[in-house]
Image: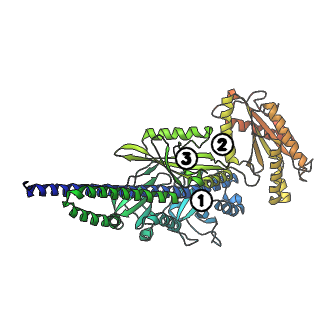
Amino acid sequence: MTEPRNPLHILIVMLSGIFAVAGLAFWAEHTSRNAHLEGLDEALRQSALSLGNNISDSIEIADLVLVGLEAEISAYGGVREMGGRLELMITRLAEHAEDLRNLHVIDKEGRLLATTVPNADTGKGFADRAYFQFHAANSTDEPLLGSPILSRLSGERIVTITKRLNDPAGGFAGVLVAHLSIDQFNALLERYLSAFGDASALLVHRDGTLLAATREFSGLVGEKVSLNASSVQPDETTLSKVTETTWPLDDRLRRTASFASGHPPFTIFIGVTTETVAQQWASKSRSRWLIGIAMLVGAVALSLRWHQQAKLHHASVATLRQREQELQLLADASGDLIERLSVDGVREYVSAAAIDVLGCRPADLIGTGVFDHLSGAERNTPIEKFVEFKRDGSEIKRVVTHYIRPDGSEAWLETTLTRLQAKGVLRGFVAITRDVTRRKQRHDELDALANTDTLTDLANRRAFDTALAARLQTARDTGTPLSLLMIDVDRFKLYNDTYGHASGDQCLKAVATAIRSAVRRDDLAARYGGEEFAVILGKADRDTARVVAEKIRRAVVALRHPHERNLPWGYTTVSVGTATADATAIAANTAQKLFESADTALYTAKETGRNRVVCDDEPGHGQDIGKVVNV
């Protein structure tokens, strides 16, 4: 008869099996919980990044509007000289920025000159506003992001973007003010956090002032908060790691992600309370723990130990697969294209938005390089930035590319790259691509407005100054001459006195059209100020400049635009002065000397009878007769 086994031995085997299965269950739950937290953390970080980009876009559009308004005011010589055009201009600029609430122009005494608020009290005082006192005391040309205030004209809660306005001598001439709605910012935060359940978000100024918040903290907007933000320099951004942080606003611990911007100066905080995270995890894991306990009870039989181990492993894999499916559903529901890339930039996952953004099916993109869809000419810069991003170890990188879809339509795409790292080892990248064509078009429209004279549709003074410096450098690099024409409408003051300023504007438009028809395709024609125009002629010596100037003069004469006090002709004429810079003589003060020489020639043309062209090398022009001007 076989001797029965020692009960102690059987107990030891049973306990060993139970402890082994318990350890496997704990490991599986720990792994699943870490996967859940990683997915939550990545969603928080990407939401903070997307929110930060949206708010930066709104503020940058407001900045561009203020720059365009400042350029128009400078072109007319000041706000007083614009008269009724000021109201029309701010209304026109505000229409190009959909996030902008209102625009104000305030004079140096703090009085309201113009606004987009209907039926506003023009002349109302704003000298006590902090932004007005800041710009009056500081000569900086940079826009200022203000703290939350209540608008005195519309009654809305707003955040201001302001810019100092200078007079022609550089002195303080007033303040340009753009309004952004705090309620719109609050709604934007709520919309982004709707997928997280019980989550909170804050928009905080660099000085600690709360600019916007989700509903539980919206009553604190305008107060100081003391959340630690990443320190960034202007034109830098930082996407933080997710940490557990106690928010002093309600002393609750949250898993928090932040996005810090140096310009504009703000920080986005997004957080989910640890209680909410624990409750979500408990609700998902409670059933698994009950099943595990039941299995552990049955683990006394060695025959069930391997079955239990396999079942727990299956549950863990199913949980991880569910997390991946949930993340994929979020990605496919997003309007932005989300891709997971290998370390070498090869696509491993592509969301459904690829059809709308790239015009390609996701299945056709798997296994291709992230920049393979770009043409040869467009690929070099993005690839260089990608290689630099891999090498420098930075957290995020933004790349803007010009893209031609398979159907031939053009688009501007902005791709934000973030690293995927595990225990300090780079595992790949996440690329979020969105179509920024409309934003690019708005930017180009505002840039055109900022560089175009609204009356004549020629380049304005600001664009002229920039182009002259650039084309002088090109002339020096290519070894070719450059000429400048200065054009003045003869006896234009008498024209205004006789026919009125409205007719004077029509006269200037006609002259501008004649100038545009007479110059070459690559020449730049600009309204320099008042009735004075300027033309930059690239690759043009004195003879070419004289020919073009005479062509302009004849084109204006051919208009036969009536001007009874411009005797002896009785119609509108122009005087033209030309100056030429030899490529070998271009130096730092070239632009000033070239302008002075052309202006002197123009003065000579007007003094010697008007309706003529005088070149800088003609007798009687000055002391530099017959010389190449040292420009």
Mark 1: which secondary structure?
A: strand
Look at mark 1 in the image and give the residue it sits on: 176
Q: Amino acid at mark 2?
A: Thr
514 lies above or below 98: above
Residue at the spot x=37%, y=58% of the render?
A: 318
On the rendered image, what quadrant is the C terminus found in?
A: top right
Q: In the rendered view, tell whether residue 469 sits above or below residue 108.
A: above
Q: Is label 2 in a helix, a strand or a loop? A: helix
Between 590 and 288, the one lying in front of the other is 288
* Pointer 3 with pointer 2, Cβ within 8 A: no
- The mark that comes first in sequence, 1 or 2, is 1
**Looking at the picture, which amino acid does disc 1 mark?**
Leu
Where in the figure is residue 486, as x and y percent of width and height?
A: 77, 41
Q: For marks 3 and 2, give the CA distance.
A: 43 Å
Q: Secondary structure at mark 3?
A: helix
Q: Is residue 610 visible?
A: no
Image disc number at residue 476: none
Label 1 packing within 10 angstroms: few (<14), some (14-19), many (20+): many
Residue under circle 3? Answer: 365
Say if residue 288 shows up in the picture.
yes
Q: Earlier in the sequence, mark 3 or mark 1?
A: 1
How many numbered markers are drawn? Answer: 3
213 lies left or right of 374: left
**Quadrant, the N terminus:** bottom left
Provide the residue designation for mark 2: 466
Horizontal relation, residue 513 to residue 158: left or right: right
Measuring from the top left, give residue 529's x and y in whole percent: 73, 49
Q: Earlier in the sequence, mark 3 or mark 2?
A: 3
Q: Quadrant of residue 41?
A: bottom left
How far apart in space, not on screen, are marks 1 and 2 (Cα)?
23 Å
